[in-house]
Image (tube, rainbow, N blue to C red):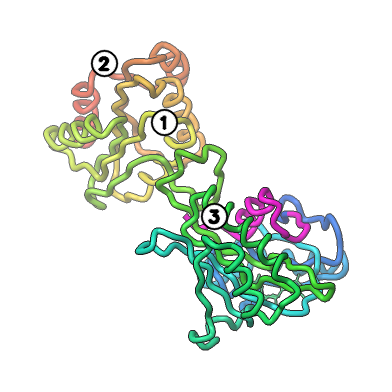
Amino acid sequence: MKLLEHEAKSLLSTYQLPVPRCFIVDSASMEPAFLPCVLKSQVPTGGRGKAGGVKVVNSTKEFHQVAAAMLQLDIKGYKPQVLLAEEVVSIKRELYVSLLIDYSAAAITVMSHPRGGVEVEANNSDDFLQLPLDDLRAASLGLSEHYDLAGQQFALEALLEKLGRAFRTEDALLLEINPLILTTDNQLVIGDSKMEVDNASIFRHPTWQFADKPADVNFVTLNTTGNTATIANGAGLAMATVDSVYNAGLVPANFLDVGGGANEASVLAAFRRIKQFKNVTAIVINIFAGITRCDEIAKAILAARQQITDLPPLYIHLEGTNFEAAAAILSPENITLYASLDDSLAAATEQLA
Ligand code: GDP
Ligand code: MN
């Protein structure tokens, strides 16, 4: 998954990397923590500078005007949920550095360019230098020569060491700093960062909470015009549920395995995806709870009924862990729990007939 700039910078700051002082702005929190500051649109795409997504503001009035406009500004099809506000950095030079994986060498490559910033793509590709990160001393010497910054070799070595540590520890696939700012008082500061981390490593990072984090449910669209949606747990039961829906003469729109760790949020997300199917007039829920807990599913069902308008009728069969707690949550709401999948399908078929 690709991290937003503020997510990447907040991660990088935990490695003592030099990121500017900052605060987050959204429609609920529109007051400047300090001024002047640079407002930066947090959209998952580059080229924000050129599109009006990076602006310096000096007064509270200007802050409010620019922030309100930037929250509404569409950049390459994206509108930001939040803005990043940073202290203004006085720029002497803008450099480029990135770390990427050299799969054939099973190693990390450092790529650099002495002229970073918004025009970096326009640079002649011959001017990019690539070095292995393994030998930090050699890489930092190479970088300081490439940047023509002989006096910064040790600062660059410290920077590369921390970037490399962040890259490995966070299971990154790409880490690009553009611009790496050389300030007028000769400090190196991370101006912008683009970071992508490996989804296959999510299990190693329980603290990751990023906007682009994939939902931990397995959802497969089967038929966009199907009349019956399915929610089940475990791939086997989810497949069997789809088969049973077919056998009952209904047309399943989807396969959905909410997984072992299903919670209210992930099941609610599943309901929202089901709502995309225009022809669905029945949702069949078939849960055999072991690790999954029936009461979590029940809470999600209640939340879905409250939060999603025009939710199709639910045909629910729950068994297993915390069934009684689930029944106690659902029966006061007059939500029927069927004794078997067959019973729930019979009811769904009758309603559709
Ligand atoms: P991008 O266009 O999406 O890559 O956004 P960047 O974060 O790279 O910002 C684009 C440009 O805005 C940078 O290359 C800088 O020239 C400028 N910029 C960003 N932050 C600052 C800052 O703190 N001070 C100043 N003066 N310029 C900045
Ligand atoms: Mn940039």
Work out whether mark 3 precedes mark 2 in sequence or the reverse, and give the earlier one: 3
Residue 132 rendering spot, x and y as whole percentages = 50, 66
- Depth order, front residue of 110/202: 110
- Depth order, front residue of 133/37: 133
**Image point (34%, 33%), residue name:** 313
Residue type indicated by callout 3: Phe
Residue 256 visible in the picture: yes
Front: mark 3 or 1: 3
Which residue is denoted by mark 1 in the rendering? 262
Residue 225 rendering spot, x and y as whole percentages = 24, 51
Residue type indicated by callout 2: Ala
Residue 167: assigned label:
3
Does 243 sit left or right of 171 as displayed? Answer: left
- Depth order, front residue of 114/277: 114
Residue range (magenta): 1-23
Report how far apart the C-alphas of labels 3 and 1 lie in the structure: 30 Å
